[in-house]
């Protein structure tokens, strides 16, 4: 596949987009969960973004724009459609106080450190897509809540609620694995 | 158990998303509540662990080139000027590859090292008993380490300085035993770590740098690796480093 649409700012696109390449690939791999699909996803994202670069509003968040394209591309792929079929209806609540008190772990239950990397990686893989993506955008990409909200197109309150539930789900999963003989 | 009033705000606080007023209030609370401080520390460790576990996948250089070309990047120079040029280019690429891999590994190792030191520093200060030998007297602290670590060291005289020695404890970094001393200046606490130089594997001249939001100075002297680590200004770190260096020479 070769791209023929060449907007006048193509040089600028390259300068803006290539530094994000490694991070986008990592995120794509976590979404698709295999290398071939991740490469297809990243390739399609770059092609779409280059084509649509003319409509990108300068001064707005380019990184969130790229991640949004990648995520939307994934969600319309076969793997993405399959993954979204398991999204639970948890979006009724929003805001930092939305998490039920029973979700709050004790400090002991929170103690998951780098000694448990393998367990943590497996637990991340097993998280439902809507939890996995917010955790990765927050912790790995270090996006602000607003950036995450822009990327996944939900209100900030939903981002906070999902993050809280995602962390609780991850801790519960890791604790369960640690308890197994 | 952390306080119910603050618990729902802890994640937003650690994500840097609380507005300044509640941020200050929670900050003050954490300094006075060991339960919430322990909870916050565990959450920080989880955040770090997720970052490391989540930064797992790297694209191949071939794939990067492929995308770069596709979006209009300058193509790589073709090797069509004869085998001499090709061999020379290959050698340069090979050496550059080795150097780049070496530097990347060094950098990764250094980042892991600083991350572990940050954990040691923060978890020690959050502890109810941060030091095992509680004394401001260097002649009490230094002998306490005898038989507990495989080296000895000199500590500086702090008279006429703003620093106070609070005490020390034995610590471990990658299973290597070392000394962890806590100094205080004004209301800030600074960690000084000492490890056998050859076992830690850090390079570089003494120079205060910013790592993991802390100011750090590190140098090797007389077979020991010194690391001064804290949230104070670089001048204070430099000043304590100077005192330690002078003491080591005496």
Image (cartoon, coloured by chain):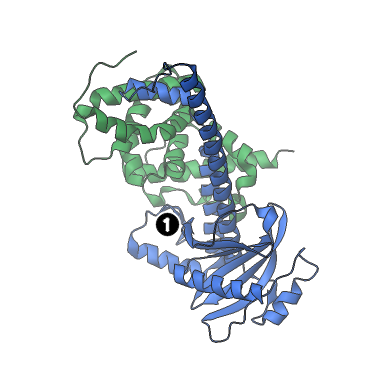
Chain colours: A green, B blue
- Label 1 residue SS: helix
Q: Please state the horizontal and vertical placement of residue B97, each as a whole percent of the image.
A: 53, 32
| Horizontal side of residue A6 vs A44, given as left or right | left
Figure quadrant of the N terminus of chain A: top left
Image-quadrant location for residue A13:
top left
In the depicted view, which residue is nearer to us: B187 or A130? B187
Figure quadrant of the C terminus of chain A: top right
In the depicted view, which residue is nearer to us: B90 or A133? B90
- Which residue, as the protein is rendered here, is positioned at the far top? A1
- Which residue, as the protein is rendered here, is positioned at the far bottom? B160
Q: Please state the horizontal and vertical placement of residue B1, each as a whole percent of the image.
A: 57, 60
The residue at the point 45 percent across, 53 percent down is B11
Vertical order, A41 against B243 (above or below): above
Vertical order, B95 against B36 (above or below): above
Residue B205 in view here:
yes
The numbered mark 1 sits on a residue in which chain?
Answer: B
Residue B60 in view here:
no
- Which residue, as the protein is rendered here, is positioned at the far right? B147
| Horizontal side of residue A119 vs B175, given as left or right | left
Disc 1: which residue: B13
Vertical order, A29 against B54 (above or below): above
Specify few, some or many for label 1: CA neighbours under 10 Å numbering under 14, 14-19, or 20 or more.
Answer: some
Total count of labels? 1
The residue at the point 48 percent across, 72 percent down is B236
Image-quadrant location for residue B181:
bottom right
In the depicted view, which residue is nearer to us: B66 or B249? B249
| Horizontal side of residue A74 vs B108, given as left or right | left
């Amino acid at each position: 596949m070769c791209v023929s649409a060449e907007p006048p700012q193509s040089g600028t696109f390259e300068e803006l987009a290539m530094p994000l390449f490694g991070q986008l690939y990592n995120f794509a791999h976590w979404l698709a969960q295999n290398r071939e699909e991740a490469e297809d996803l990243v390739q399609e994202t770059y092609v779409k973004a280059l084509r649509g670069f003319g409509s990108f509003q300068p001064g707005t968040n380019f990184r969130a724009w790229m991640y949004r394209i990648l995520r939307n591309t994934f969600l319309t792929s076969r793997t993405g459609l399959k993954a979204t079929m398991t999204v639970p209806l948890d979006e009724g609540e929003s805001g930092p106080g939305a998490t039920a008190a029973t979700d709050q772990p004790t400090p002991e239950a929170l103690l998951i450190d780098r000694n448990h990397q393998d367990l943590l990686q497996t637990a991340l893989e097993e998280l439902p897509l809507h939890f996995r993506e917010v955790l990765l955008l927050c912790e790995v990409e270090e996006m602000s809540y607003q950036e995450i909200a822009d990327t996944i197109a939900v209100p900030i309150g939903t981002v906070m609620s999902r993050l809280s539930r995602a962390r609780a789900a991850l801790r519960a999963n890791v604790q369960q694995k640690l308890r197994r003989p | 158990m952390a306080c119910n009033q603050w618990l729902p705000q802890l994640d937003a606080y650690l994500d840097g998303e609380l507005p300044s007023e509640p941020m200050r209030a929670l900050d003050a609370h954490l300094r006075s509540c060991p339960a919430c401080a322990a909870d916050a520390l565990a959450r920080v460790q989880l955040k770090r662990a997720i970052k490391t576990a989540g930064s797992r996948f790297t694209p191949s250089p071939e794939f990067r080139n492929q995308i770069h070309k596709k979006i209009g990047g300058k193509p790589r120079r073709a090797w069509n000027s004869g085998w001499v040029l090709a061999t020379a280019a290959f050698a340069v690429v090979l050496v550059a590859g080795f150097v780049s891999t070496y530097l990347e590994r060094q950098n990764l190792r250094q980042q892991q090292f600083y991350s572990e030191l940050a954990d040691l520093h923060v978890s020690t200060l959050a502890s109810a008993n941060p030091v095992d030998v509680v004394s401001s007297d260097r002649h009490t602290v230094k002998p306490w380490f005898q038989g507990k670590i495989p080296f000895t060291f000199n500590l500086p005289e702090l008279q006429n300085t703003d620093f106070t020695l609070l005490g020390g404890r034995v610590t471990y970094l990658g299973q290597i035993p070392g000394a962890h001393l806590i100094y205080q200046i004004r209301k800030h606490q600074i960690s000084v770590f000492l490890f056998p130089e050859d076992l830690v594997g850090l390079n570089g001249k003494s120079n205060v740098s910013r790592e993991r939001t802390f100011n750090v100075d590190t140098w090797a002297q007389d077979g020991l690796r010194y690391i001064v680590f804290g949230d104070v200004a670089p001048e204070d770190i430099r000043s304590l480093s100077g005192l330690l260096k002078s003491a080591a020479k005496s």
